[in-house]
Amino acid sequence: MKRTALKAGLAMSLLSSACQGAALEALDISGRLETRQALTREGEWGLNEYSALLGGSWQDDSGWRYKMQVRALQENQLDGDYHEVEPRELFAEYQGDRCTNTLGVQQVVWGSADRLRVLDVIHAFDRREGYFGDYVQQRRPLAMLNSECSVFEDQSLQLLVIPQTRKDLLPDAGSRFAEPSVGNALAGIPRTEADDPDWRKPADWTPALKWSGNLQGIDYSLNAWHGWQTEESYTARLSQGGLSYRESLKRRTLFGGSFAMPVGPVVFKGEAALVPDAYRYSRAPTGVLELEKNRQQQLLLGVDYLSGDWFFGMQYYNLWKDEVKDAVDQDRSEIVSLAIRREMWQGRLYLTGYLAQDLRNCAQYAALEMRYDLDAHWQLRTGLDLFDGDRQSFGYFDEQSRWVNAVRYSF
C-alpha cells in the first residue's frame, strides 16, 4: 500500500510541476466516483466495490500535453479484502508535424474484438472477475514509450518500447472467479522461482510494432509484439531430492493483423494472430506434468450493423493449438457471440445485450444491462451476468450468476 500511495503522490507532483505558471483555466480537471454491488442467485453478496478516479490534463503552446489519472479502489467480496491506489495514466505527450510521442504510464489497445482477445495482448488483466464484469477497466496500465508517425498518406507506424512487465492479477484458489490452474494442482510440491523480467535490463523490455492504413476503403493493420506471458509457467525438474517445479515467466511473440471493410451501414471485420512460442502441459506416463512449447493460432470474423438507434454485432472466434500427446487442455476453442444495443430517450437510456456460445463445450454466457444517464453527472446501471452449460467452459461459474447494480458520479 505504501508503494501505491507513493506512486499516486508522485503522479500529483509531476502534474503540478508541469502546470506551474499556466493559467488556471488551461488545467482540465475530471473525476469519477463509483460503486458496484452484486447479488448471486443464492442471495449472497458477490461484489462490493467502491472506486474513485481523479485526473487532470494540460497542454501548452509548444505542443506538449500532460495527463494524469489516479484510481483508488476497494472491494471485499470477490477475493477477500482488496484495495489499491495506482496511476491509470501518467504521461507527457508531444505532438509534432508527423509524429506523436507519448512517454509514461498509459494503455494501448490493439484490435476491436468485443470481449474476445486476439490482438489485445499489450497489457495484463485484472482477472478477479474473470474476463467478465467491467472489462474495459481490467487492463493493467504500463510505463512505455508510444510513438505514432504518419509515414505516407493514410499509412502510419506505431512503435512501443515497454520496459515494465506486469502479470495478470489472479484470484486466490476458492475465490468466486478462480479458474482451475496448474499452480493450484501442484500445491504441496516444492517450487523454485526464477527472476522476473527486470526493467533495468533492455534485453527484458517488450518491443511492439503496428503498421496501419487504408487501402481501397479497407482499414487494415499488421502487428508484431515480443513480450512476456502474463501467468507463470511451471517446468518439472527431477533430482535426487525428488520432483520439483521451477516457476517462471517465458517470452511470448505474436504476429497478426486486422481489417475492417464498411459497406453502407455494415462493417465486415476480422483479426488473426499467430503465437509461435505458446506453451501447453501434458501428462507423462509417470504422472508428472511436463511443459512443452507449442504453436497457437487465432481467427476472429465479425459483422457490425448500425442503423439509427440500433446496433448489432456478430463474431466468430476460433483458437487452435498444435497437437500435444496427453495434453491436459483442449486443442481447439470456438465461440460465437451476438451483441445488441438500443439507444432511447435522446441518448439517455441504453439497453445492451451480449451472448456468447461455446460451440465445443455447449456452454453459454449472457450479459444484459440497462444504463440510464440522469444528467451530465449521474449514471445508473443495472444488469445480469448469467452462466450456464458445461463446467469446462462458462458453466464452471454457474453459481456466480448475479444481478449487478452500479451508481456513477462524474465531474
Image (cartoon, helix red, strand yellow):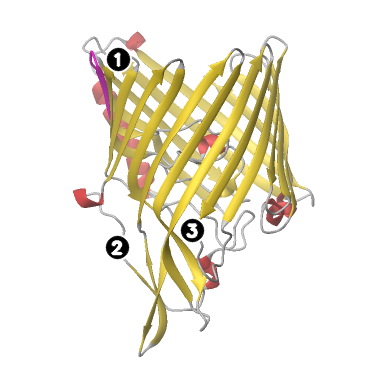
Q: Which residues are magenta?
A: 94-102
Using the image, tell me which numbered label, if any, was put on residue 179.
none
Q: Which residue is mark 2?
A: 195
Nearer the viewer's eye, disc 2 or disc 1?
A: 2
Secondary structure that dominates the magenta span: strand
Task: For the residues labelled 2 and 1, say whether their Cβ atoms are less than 8 Å apart.
Answer: no
Identify the residue at horizontal 59%, vertical 58% (top origin): 179
| Most distant residue in the right direction | 42
Q: CA distance from mark 3 to mark 2?
A: 29 Å
Q: Kindly identify the amino acid type of the residue bearing the numbered disc 3.
A: Asp
Residue 218: x %, y % from top left? 46, 20
* Callout 2: SS: loop
* Location of residue 262 (image quadrant): top right
Give the residue at x 50% y 70%: 282
**Number of numbered discs overlaid on the protein picture:** 3
Classed neighbour count for the residue bearing mark 2: other residues with Cα under 10 Å, few (<14), some (14–19), many (≥20): few
For the point 66% across and 54% down, which residue is it?
393
Q: Is residue 302 visible?
A: yes
Q: Residue 76: say if magenta.
A: no
- Residue 75 visible within the image: no
Amino acid bearing label 2: Asp
Closer to the eye: label 3 or 2 = 3
Disc 3: which residue: 322
The CA span between labels 1 and 3 is 50 Å
Nearer the observer: mark 1 or 3; the answer is 3
